[in-house]
Image (cartoon, coloured by chain):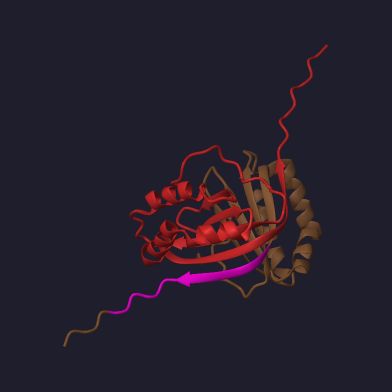
Chain colours: A red, B brown
Amino acid sequence: MSEHSEAPVAPVAAYEPPYYAAVFTTVRTQEQSGYSETAACMEELVQDIPGYLGMDHAQTPGGLGITVGYFRDADALTEWRTNAEHRAAQQRGQAQWYESYTLHVAKVERSHGFTRARTPQSPAAD
Amino acid sequence: MSEHSEAPVAPVAAYEPPYYAAVFTTVRTQEQSGYSETAACMEELVQDIPGYLGMDHAQTPGGLGITVGYFRDADALTEWRTNAEHRAAQQRGQAQWYESYTLHVAKVERSHGFTRARTPQSPAAD
């Protein structure tokens, strides 16, 4: 998330389907105390879920946030959904941080990626 | 997108599954001339696709962008993917606007939403 650990920015790559994507779209309240600490904690915690593949996050300032978590299979997602610390964070999210959200859990059927080719060096003049 | 039409901010609601989500995650280049006009044009154009349900977009300034388009079925997505104006925009995106991107096309199996209840008025004192 915008407050999350600063890694080089790149989208999560396309995995070989099938895999799962959990698309979480949010509008946040004015009351964000504790949010960034909990978000960082969840980002650590999810790494321990077997079958966790990665996460993309984008946040329009003052607008919509979208987090997409990628998981190898439905079991991995179930383990994450029912994790006790994650459940506590979900409850606090409803009580405090989120004005509204939608969660879409979806099985990826196809995917592909694009990465710009490096600009080749100009050939040396003869 | 951040440059897109300004509507009241709310996530697209949960539809009755199954439906499709196309998750498009991007990192953009420095060369963004024409991007916002084309994005606005695509946002108009997609509304004409039968089975188009809605779109969520978030953009971290200088970071990741995520656009999620929702469609009733695979046919709707195919129609959008193969639309001539959309294809031209895709090609310009690869040539100019995107450093890297990933597209995940996924069938939504379950979804739910949350909207904060309005704070009730305090009862009048007797």
Report whether residue B3 is seen. Answer: no
At 29% from the left edge and 79% from the top edge, which residue is drawn?
B121
- In the image, A119 versus B68, the foreground residue is B68
Q: Quadrant of residue B97?
A: top right
At 64% from the left edge and 73% from the top edge, which residue is drawn?
B17
Magenta residues, dominant SS class: strand
Is A9 left, or right, of B116 in this rendering?
Answer: right
Instruction: Name, please, the residue furthest toward the left.
Output: B126
Is B51 left, or right, of B15 in this rendering?
Answer: right
At 81% from the left edge and 58% from the top edge, which residue is drawn?
B84
Asked whether residue A125 is drawn in magenta, I would say no
Image label count: 0
- In the image, A41 versus B61, the foreground residue is A41
At 48% from the left edge and 62% from the top edge, which residue is drawn?
A82
Query: Which quadrant of the rendered structure holds the N terminus of chain B?
Result: bottom right
Q: Position of residue A115 (x, y in %)?
A: 70, 40
* A71 in relation to B52, above or below: above
Asked whether residue B112 is drawn in magenta, I would say yes
Query: Which quadrant of the rendered structure holds the C terminus of chain B?
Result: bottom left
Q: Quadrant of residue B33?
A: top right
The residue stretch that appears in magenta: B107-121
Q: Position of residue B68 (x, y in %)?
A: 63, 59
Report whether residue B63 is seen. Answer: yes
Q: Position of residue B87 (x, y in %)?
A: 78, 54
- In the image, A110 versus A65, the foreground residue is A110
Q: Position of residue B61 (x, y in %)?
A: 52, 46
- In the image, B27 versus A82, the foreground residue is A82
Instruction: Name, please, the residue furthest toward the right.
Output: A126
